Image (cartoon, rainbow, N blue to C red):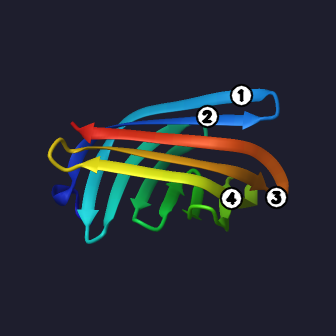
């Protein structure tokens, strides 16, 4: 994937985390690129966190969503509706096994308007400990 083939986008990602009585919302607004290749849509963006820069690629197909992160945090995780999947999560502080049970995946893309919406909800387990229910929404449009 070359940048000149990508559509520059404005992207907003909102993640709601519910763990018992605790509720947390994490939001990110950034610029990135959208690529359409065969039967997949790829979203590429970066975020700056306390640990450093994290590059993220989200691959969306009819069957699954794959989130790939590199930089200060590394991970590759596959989400499939109604399935339990396992992956690894790496930080400078250590490596954790993450397991998700994906409840829902919804994706819409309007080719004419060059904008899209991805919704993903799942139950997360880190190192065999329940880490709550997560709902992630990514909205993007041509910059």
Please tell me whether mark 4 or mark 2 is closer to you in this view.
4
Crowdedness of circle 1 by 10 Å Cα count: few (<14), some, many (20+)? few
Secondary structure at badge 4 equals strand
Give the residue at x 75% y 59%.
96
Give the residue at x 51% y 56%.
69
Secondary structure at badge 2 equals strand
Where is the C terminus found, in terms of image quarters? top left
Pinpoint residue 56: horizontal percent, then vertical percent. Answer: 45, 52
Q: Earlier in the sequence, mark 3 or mark 2?
A: 2
Secondary structure at badge 3 equals loop
Q: Earlier in the sequence, mark 1 or mark 3?
A: 1
Say the numbered circle drawn on residue 101: 4
Please tell me whether mark 3 or mark 4 is closer to you in this view.
4
Residue to which mark 3 is pinned: 127
Please tell me whether mark 1 or mark 4 is closer to you in this view.
4
Say the numbered circle drawn on residue 23: 1
Pinpoint residue 132: horizontal percent, then vertical percent. Answer: 75, 43
Residue 57 appears in the rendering:
yes
Say the numbered circle drawn on residue 16: 2
Query: Left or right of 131: which side holds 35?
Result: left
Query: Left or right of 103: which side holds 117?
Result: left
């Amino acid at each position: 994937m070359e940048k000149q083939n990508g559509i520059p986008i404005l992207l907003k990602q909102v993640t709601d985390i519910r763990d018992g009585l605790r509720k947390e919302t994490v939001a990110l607004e950034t610029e990135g690129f959208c690529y359409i290749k065969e039967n997949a849509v790829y979203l590429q963006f970066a975020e700056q966190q306390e640990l450093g820069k994290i590059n993220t690629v989200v691959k969306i197909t009819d069957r699954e969503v794959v989130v790939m992160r590199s930089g200060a945090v590394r991970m590759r995780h596959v989400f499939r509706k109604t399935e339990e999947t396992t992956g690894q999560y790496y930080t400078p502080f250590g490596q954790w096994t993450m397991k998700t049970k994906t409840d829902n995946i919804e994706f819409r893309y309007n080719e004419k308007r060059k904008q899209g919406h991805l919704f993903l909800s799942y139950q997360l387990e880190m190192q065999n400990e329940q880490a709550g229910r997560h709902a992630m929404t990514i909205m993007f449009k041509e910059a």
